[in-house]
Amino acid sequence: MAKLVGPALGAGAEVRLHELTKTFGPVVAVREVSVTIAPGSFFTLLGPSGSGKTTTLMMVAGFAYPTSGEVFVDGKPMAALPPQKRDLGMVFQSYAVFPHLTVFDNVAFPLEIRKAPRLEILRRVGEALELVRLTGYERRLPRQLSGGEQQRVALARALVFQPRVLLMDEPLGALDKKLRAHMQLELKHIQQHLHVTVIYVTHDQEEALTMSDRVAVMQGGRIEQVGSPAELYDTPASRFVADFIGESNFLDGVAVSSEPDGRWRCRAPGGLELSGVAAVPLQPGQPITAAVRPEKLVQTEDAVALGPGANTCKGLVEEAIYLGDATRYRVGIGPDGAVTIKVPNRVGARPLATGAAVALAWSPDDTRLFPRDDA
Amino acid sequence: MKASAERRETLRYLLLLLPALVVLAVLFAYPLLGILTRSVYKAGYTLEFYRQIFRVPVYLQVLWGTFRVSALVTLFCLALGYPLAYALAACRPRTARLLTIIVILPFFTSIIVRTYAWMVLLGRNGIVNQYLVALGLTDKPLPLLYNQAGVVIGMSYVLLPYMVLTVYSVMRGIDPGLIRAAHSLGASRLQAFRRIFLPLSLPGIAGGTLLVFILSLGFFITPALMGGPGDVMIAMLIEREVEITLNWSFASALAVVLLALTLVGFAGYNRLVRLERVFEGRT
């Protein structure tokens, strides 16, 4: 049976996944995932459905058994332990609050299992409910609570026995947008307050960027890239990451010649020439895709700061979409190409009319070059 | 305007209820009223028949025996049916469907045929006794037929599917995520079962035991064929009064007493497990 050995605050555990693989018959759900998660950090597994992120989390939790590979928590291998002996807190997407128990009894459950003394249970449940701001809800039954409140009960219950790692499987997926944004910040604050290591699964890239210290982007059972939110956004390692995190313009072309600092000169259809930073080593003549974020494209008259060597192109405004804080324009370039640009609606901003000619510029440093497999 | 629309809506639902209400009134309420009247009327109003039930010990003995056998049958059905329902709920949907069909299969045959089949199995030289003797578990054949054991075995067999299906339908509604959550919080399999699964399946236990118990009270064929002279149940007594002694008023009085005791039992049970929650389908 799990013992009640709640560590002091500031003691998240290090979690290391070593070549974790999970196959279901002929299907490889997770393929050789290796990553080290720093103690007390907020780590997110981000990916579309079917990317293997939940299966990976379930292997950490012990609900799925790895085909090969191992999970280490503070260096201790977990494979031989059933979920109830791993001492990891877990919050599920479906809340999984026990419907026949009051809020108090739900949160007290892990402590009663660990045979904690009555007074300690009272104190800890009180603290946990205070942490999730549900003080005064002790006597209520789950069906008397809203979805957000139920999820907070689940969170309090997963934290009350002071696990060193907290696993969360799309915990905010069922909440509406406003409440989700609020809970994201609250979760982040609780995590920073307790210094618990969090492994968080989501398909929502905005959520991942908001909350995480580090994010692993998963696709097809593999980790495509691990990095801080800024690293993933500014220097995506693959076209998939550039597409999945935020928004990108993709221009297909061919690598022409290498320049210093890992830059390459490329040619795109319509006589467009551009420079960019290669995400992986390239060969001259290799088909590439250049990726650039919509907000990095500016009109030439605003491009003074870019200095010499900036990429430029000319186009016609095809469509303007007003977003409130910014306006998104679709600009046609060349015979059938188009890019999306995002212009902040600052004081004195002049909106562009549909059909207007614009000259655009962007920095080679903001241009990522990926090899094109399909060519 | 809105109120009248609401009234029309209510009216529509009442209209849908009407056929069922008419059938119940004609086939159930009216005859029941007839039984009530007949039990206190035979060439003039009298309470003689009730007095007779409470004066002659054998009737109360039979009533008591009926309740005891029903309780035993209910316990057996629960003991056998709960694990079976649990297995059904735990296995994959396709397997569960197949097993459910197997559970229901006996209903496709007449209860008399099935009761005779049990008599063949349980007789002095029946298959069960042959095996028991051959395996050396007993020296001489056990008396399994024409006694209370036979009645309980036969009735439990017939009523088991009612228990299994009622319990299973509740268990199927229990979110497996709750059991996972219990494990993630440190609960062993046994703890997760005892503290989460079992309480959540209580409505199924309550519904199943109630159903089996009430069906048992009125059982006729199985105890008549598989019981001995000492295993008379109230339904058999009523049948005898109707068919043989032609004392319909006394039969009616017996039926009313059975109904009253059942209702009292139901009320007590209701206080115990809050049946309205069972029928709302939640705990």
Image (tube, rainbow, N blue to C red):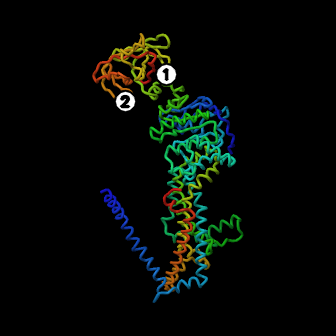
Disc ID at residue A282: none
Three-letter amino acid code of the residue under disc 2: Leu
Q: Nearer the viewer, residue A105 or B264?
A: A105
Question: Residue B141 versus residue B200: which sits nearer the camera?
Answer: B200
Which callout, 1 or 2, points at the residue further toward the start of the chain?
1
Q: Nearer the viewer, residue B161 or A15?
A: A15
Which is in the foreground here, disc 1 or disc 2?
2
Q: Is residue A170 left or right of residue A112?
A: left
**What x and y, as percent, mark residue B27?**
41, 74
How many numbered circles does the render carry? Answer: 2
Quadrant in which residue A335 is drawn: top left
Callout 1: SS: loop
Task: Report which residue position mark 1 lands on.
Answer: A235
Tell me the quadrant of the picture where the N terminus of chain A can be found.
top right
Q: Are marks 1 and 2 on the same chain?
A: yes
The extreme bottom residue here reads B43
Marked residue chain, label 1: A
One can see residue B203 in this view: yes
Q: Report the residue marked by disc 2.
A: A323
Image: A252 above or below A20: above
Q: Position of residue A202 (x, y in %)?
A: 50, 35
- Neighbor class of circle 2 (other Cα within 10 Å; few <14, some 14-19, many 20+) is few
Element on which disc 2 rests: loop
